[in-house]
Image (cartoon, grey):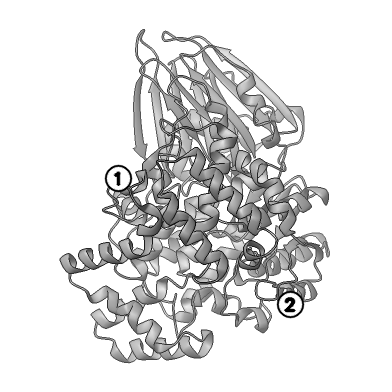
């Protein structure tokens, strides 16, 4: 895991790689080349995980082909690929996965990408052909941003590296900021919240030809799409296969030359990872304990220590606990926002920050985490009305009622509430659009008013925009719902936050639920084996029947790095929240309706309305603007 920078047609600036020294505290590399359209620069900051010797330093050159690479990520199947390439006569001089990736690209070109099993963003320069090849992994685990003009283009691991370069204007992208404020989503398009800054999307590669004087030639292609077919299998067959794939993924994600630990929330996903890690470490190394790090709170509504303790006892893990404090939220907000590059959705990101901070104190350099399970397995409660509506549409009335009754029994959600959620799906198209507009206006007119957010149209929700941009089918059932969440919307945002929080502390975060054979199997289940008898992620629960303690396997509440945000904001942090709100309104007076924003915020703080993540989003927009000097 590392940080990279590359530019073409610009004056080489080594400081661009120093900005992200936190991503790679173990080494630095910088090299320049000549091309007909100007100088090429490749920069790298190294976090040593595999092959800790100097032989793994980057930029790495393949002397035979003249290709050099800077690479951020891990190729988990590098041993298998190395053996395959060696059988062809390829000779290796290091033990690193970087050299395997470099040789794979030289031998197979773009066809190497489907062979890779891992997370990656890289830039490779072919000095003989004067061609840049840039690629990102299937699900966007590792970031890659760029700014461009007709004569130049620059790539970077973090947006802050691009500040001040040609193409970077320092203005807000109001459309994407509006998506964030209204819908609570980001990273769902190639655009960012910085006007003029784009990202290579998940599963894309770009080639840049610089062989002729004048302008470069650029082409971007989607190299990955998961198979669209639906697999038919029994619940037992599905759980057995899921268990096998997840176990194989954990095994590969444990490949490391430095200590590996895990984030542990006590939920189904992280607990499954820790339990499988414990089994495999015990089998492979004679009883090494899993190092876990967990966030706990005195506020019982969000504290999961009971479940964490159950997993620690079950696996004999070596636990570490941190207790995020309200007084630290605003003290650290500016620094966290700087590392995140863009505004983030809630103080849960602060809690995650504290977990990685503790992992660094414990000397753990690699942490496994549970991101991705909810998206591919319909783990969010928003999947229920979609599933219920699909059952009604297909005439499965008995399953429809059973699902609602089971959910009421397991999670306490009243039948009436579930019926209202489903009823909204039956409203005819034109009428639904009209009612949605009225409902949105009722909910948001207090703070949107005549501000910039109200002027961009907002015909589609942010998720609809993401689905259209990715070329996916509209959400109609759990199949299309899981595909949209995994490939187009929610997952990419969560991966952004995880990457920045971990790398801020020089830690590599690995996400074994996003091993692509496992994801492809989960998506191939379509709408089956995901929500069953009122339970989400049914196939995961069944696959972990003899692995997880029953207390964890039967959990039906969902928190996920939650903080006691409501009690914090209405209590010790109220003044700072109000001050933060005012700073946002003063900095961006044309963004929102000030009177309505203050009224809605006050209603939330006084308890007249539920306190939602919207409040933090508004506050954090101002912190972001101050930290990066962003104008409208």
Residue 503 image position (x, y, % from top left): 66, 42
Quarter of the picture holding the N terminus: top right
Residue 213 image position (x, y, % from top left): 36, 7
Residue 455: mark in rendering: 1
Quarter of the picture holding the C terminus: top left
Mark 2 crowd level (few <14, some 14–19, many ≥20, 10 Å Cα): few
* 92 w.r.t. 36: above or below: below
- Mark 2 lies on residue: 306
Residue at 70% in and 35% down: 22
Is residue 223 toward the left or the right of residue 621 in the image? left
- The answer, for residue 612, to whether it is visible in the render is no
Residue 342 image position (x, y, % from top left): 53, 42
Q: Judge by depth and name the residue closer to the eye, 325 or 244.
A: 325
Secondary structure type for disc 2: helix
Residue 369 image position (x, y, % from top left): 63, 58
Residue at 48% in and 50% down: 492
Is residue 584 toward the left or the right of residue 574 in the image? left
Q: Which residue reaches farthest front? A: 595
* 193 w.r.t. 263: above or below: above
Q: Which label lies toward us, 2 or 1?
A: 1
Residue at 60% in and 70% down: 559
* 63 w.r.t. 523: above or below: above
- The answer, for residue 410, to whether it is visible in the render is yes
Residue 308: mark in rendering: none
């Amino acid at each position: 895991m590392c940080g990279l920078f590359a530019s073409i047609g610009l004056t080489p600036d080594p400081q661009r790689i120093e900005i992200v020294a936190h991503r790679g505290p173990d080494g630095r590399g910088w090299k320049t080349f000549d091309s007909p359209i100007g100088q090429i620069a490749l920069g790298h900051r190294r976090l040593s995980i595999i092959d800790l010797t100097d032989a793994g330093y980057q930029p790495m050159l393949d002397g035979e082909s003249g290709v050099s690479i800077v690479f951020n990520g891990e190729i988990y199947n590098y041993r298998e690929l190395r053996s395959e390439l060696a059988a062809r006569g390829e000779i290796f001089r290091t033990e690193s996965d970087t050299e395997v990736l470099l040789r794979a690209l030289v031998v197979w070109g773009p066809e190497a990408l489907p062979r890779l099993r891992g997370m990656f963003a890289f830039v490779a320069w072919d000095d003989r052909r004067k061609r840049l090849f840039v690629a990102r992994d299937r699900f966007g685990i590792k970031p890659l941003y760029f700014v461009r003009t007709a004569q130049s283009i620059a790539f970077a691991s973090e947006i802050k590296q691009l500040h001040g370069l040609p193409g970077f204007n320092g203005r807000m992208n109001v459309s994407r900021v509006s998506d964030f404020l209204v819908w609570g989503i980001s990273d769902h398009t190639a655009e960012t919240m910085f006007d003029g800054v784009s990202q290579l999307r998940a599963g894309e590669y770009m080639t840049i030809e610089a062989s002729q004087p004048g302008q470069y030639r650029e082409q971007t292609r989607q190299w990955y799409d998961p198979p669209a077919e639906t697999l038919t299998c029994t619940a037992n067959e599905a759980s057995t296969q899921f268990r096998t794939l997840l176990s194989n993924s954990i095994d590969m994600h444990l490949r490391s030359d430095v200590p590996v630990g895990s984030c542990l929330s006590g939920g189904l996903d992280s607990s499954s990872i820790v339990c499988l890690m414990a089994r495999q470490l015990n089998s492979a190394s004679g009883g090494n304990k899993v190092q876990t790090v967990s966030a706990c709170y005195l506020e019982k509504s969000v504290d999961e220590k009971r479940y964490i303790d159950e997993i620690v006892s079950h696996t004999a893990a070596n636990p570490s606990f941190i207790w995020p404090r309200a007084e630290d939220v605003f003290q650290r907000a500016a620094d966290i926002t700087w590392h995140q590059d863009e505004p983030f959705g809630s103080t849960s990101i602060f809690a995650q920050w504290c977990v990685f901070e503790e992992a660094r104190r414990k000397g753990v350099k690699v942490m496994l985490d549970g991101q991705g399970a909810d998206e591919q397995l319909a783990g969010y409660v928003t999947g229920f009305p979609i599933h219920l509506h699909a059952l009604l549409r297909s005439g499965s009335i008995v399953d429809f009622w059973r699902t609602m009754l089971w959910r009421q029994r397991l999670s306490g959600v009243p039948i009436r509430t579930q019926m209202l959620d489903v009823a909204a799906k039956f409203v005819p198209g034109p009428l639904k659009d009209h009612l949605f507009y009225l409902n949105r206006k009722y909910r948001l007119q207090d703070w949107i008013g005549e501000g910039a957010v109200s002027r961009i149209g907002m015909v589609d929700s942010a998720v609809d925009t993401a689905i259209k941009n990715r070329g996916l089918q509209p959400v109609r059932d759990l199949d299309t719902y899981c595909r949209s969440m995994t490939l187009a919307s929610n997952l990419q945002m969560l991966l952004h936050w995880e990457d920045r929080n971990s790398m801020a502390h020089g830690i590599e975060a690995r996400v074994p639920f996003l091993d692509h054979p496992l994801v492809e199997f989960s998506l191939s289940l379509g709408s089956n084996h995901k929500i069953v008898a009122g339970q989400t992620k049914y196939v995961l629960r069944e696959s972990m029947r003899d692995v997880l303690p029953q207390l964890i396997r039967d959990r039906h509440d969902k928190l996920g790095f939650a903080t006691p945000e409501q009690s914090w904001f209405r209590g010790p942090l109220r003044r700072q929240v109000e001050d933060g709100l005012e700073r946002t309104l003063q900095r961006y007076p044309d963004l929102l309706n000030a009177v309505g924003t203050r009224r809605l915020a006050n209603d939330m703080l006084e308890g007249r309305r539920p306190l939602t993540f919207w409040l933090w989003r508004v506050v954090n927009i101002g912190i972001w603007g101050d930290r990066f000097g962003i104008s409208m």
